[in-house]
Image: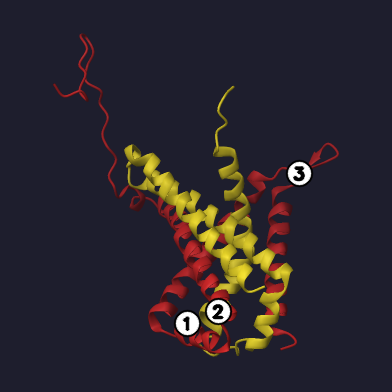
Amino acid sequence: MHKRSPEPLLWLLFSAGGVASALFVPVLVLLFGLAFPLGWLSPPSYEHLYNLVHHPLTRLVLFGISVVSLFHAAHRFRFTLYDGLQIKHLNEMIAVGCYGGAVVLSIWAAYLLRQIG
Amino acid sequence: MNERHVYTEYHPRWLRSRPSTYWWLQRRAYLSFITRELSSIFIAWFVVYLLLLVRAVSLGNSNYQAFLEWSRHPVVMVLNVVTLFFVLFHAVTWFNLAPKAIVVHLGRKRLPGSLISAANYGAWVAATAFVLWILLAGD
């Protein structure tokens, strides 16, 4: 029996998160980070946003985008530290820290999106 | 004895100079590489921001209004402007790289990379329009 490496799965999550975040995050940052706060556009009413987020499909999509984007970020940041800072001796600690962070935030996302239903 | 230095007979010492910690400032390509890599931090930040919004909406209208008020705070705004820059950089580099990752054959011909990039940019426009529509229309 050989032990399977987790690397292919991590790269798969990295790609999925790369696509999801490239497609959806720019417009969301533009709206909720810039256009609404600066008053360029009026933010959606509470009822509209609540109904939208309450819908099971929206919650599922938000969960999916959050999880893959978090693992994308964790994977990329792991290699940023690896290449950028030349601290190869801390490899395992870095990996645990990065993916651990993604797991914790994913659990938080699941909790929040379950609660709103 | 220091274990890291092993000298063998008739063998010169390894000549290996350690690159500078700031190696990524030396060339434009290196700088854009590290910029792309650092986009990860801002994507993680935005997921947290989005989840805080979901949390506020789940807690009621007054929490939602408090979130909107908080989003107008200068520090949060500056952070989100920087985030927008990094996220756009990520999106553009990602879509430009897509033809190298996706190879599509149609019969015996390989689809040109420009077509695959174009399809990705098309998907980006569609996703953006869809998000704008569900958030802003019919409200």
Residue lying farthest to the left in this orientation: B1
Q: Is residue A65 left or right of residue A56?
A: left
Q: Colour of chain A?
A: yellow
Q: On screen, A89 above or below B134?
A: above
| Residue that label 3 marks | B104
Q: Is residue B92 visible?
A: no
Residue B51 percent across, percent down from the top left: 54, 70
Q: Are marks 2 and 1 in contact (CB under 8 Å)?
A: yes
Q: Amino acid at mark 1?
A: Ser
In the image, which is nearer the foreground, mark 2 or mark 3? 2
Describe the element under mark 2 as helix, strand or loop: helix
Residue A99 visible, this angle: yes
Instruction: State the residue at coordinates (63%, 74%).
Output: A116
- Tell me the number on the disc at residue B71: 1
CA distance separating discs 3 and 1: 43 Å
* Amino acid beneath label 3: Val
The quadrant of the picture occupied by the C terminus of chain B is: bottom right
Chain (red): B
Disc 3: host chain: B
Q: Using the image, tell me which numbered label, if any, was put on residue A24.
A: none
- Describe the element under mark 1 as helix, strand or loop: helix
**What is the number of the mark on residue A32?**
2
| Label 3: few (<14), some (14–19) or many (≥20) C-alpha neighbours in 10 Å | few
> Where is residue B120 drawn, in percent x and y?
69, 58
